Amino acid sequence: MSSVTGRSMTYESAVRSRVADVMVTCPKTLGPLSRVDDLRALFSDDHVHMALVVNSDGRLITTIERPDIPEAAYNSAAVTEFGTLVGRTVQASYPLDAATTAMRFEARRRLAVVDDFGRLLGLLCLKRDGTGYCSNEGIRARADER
């Protein structure tokens, strides 16, 4: 069993669950005018694995992981020059077990959750030990500890 937002989840209920049931709904985001120095500041938190760059209308522009940024990238470079959406997004209605299987197969712990129009809804976060998913409550608790 894995813990999902404070509840125990059996395999059967995980199979019936959708990504929206466990996604984090308060992910950190950057705007389209953000620069690499903003991105590096965001990544200074080792819990942040993926930067989500979002337009003012909420549409996801790109996702960026640490390896997407060359060390030689200028701090003043626009973050929109980096990253991709390919292989890094999932629909909120997608089956949770299928999304989790795909994440494990690709050694990925984060997927941006979007709607049919590409608007960011949240972030699917597989815990480091693979036993469950990050939650809004867990993220808030970690922030309170700092």
Image (tube, grey):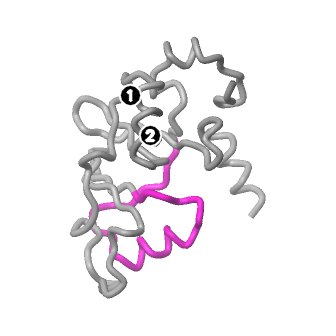
| 10 Å crowding of disc 2: few (<14), some (14-19), many (20+) | many
Marks 1 and 2 in Cβ contact (< 8 Å)? yes
Which comes before the other along the chain, label 1 or label 2?
A: 1
Question: Secondary structure under badge 1?
Answer: loop
Residue 122's label in the rendered image is: 2
Q: Using the image, determine if residue 62 lies above or below residue 74.
A: above
Residue 50 placement, left or right of 6: left
For the residue marked with disc 1, what is the amino acid?
Ala
| Mark 1: few/some/many CA within 10 Å (<14, 14-19, 20+) | many
Which residue is at 41% across, 21% downward?
95
Q: Using the image as rendered, state which of residue 48 and residue 95 is in the foreground.
A: 95
Location of mark 1 (residue) = 92
Taking the magenta stretch, the answer to whether it contains residue 127 is no
Where does the C terminus fall, quadrant-wise?
Answer: bottom right
Q: Per the image, is 38 magenta?
A: yes
Q: Secondary structure at mark 2?
A: strand
- Which residue is at the far front? 105
Residue 102 versus residue 78 in the image, above or below: above
Residue stretch in magenta? 26-51
Residue 53 quadrant: bottom left
- Residue at 29% x, 69% y: name it: 79
Can you give x and y, in whole percent of width and height, for residue 100 in the image? 47, 33
As drawn, the label of residue 4 is none
Q: Amino acid at mark 2?
A: Gly
**Looking at the picture, how far across and down is residue 94, in whole percent?**
37, 24
Residue most toward the right?
A: 145
Q: What secondary structure do most residues of the magenta stretch adopt?
A: loop
Which residue corresponds to the image point at 42% horizontal and 68% vertical from the top-left? 66
Instruction: Name above or below for residue 61 compared with residue 120.
Output: below
The quadrant in which residue 90 appears is top left
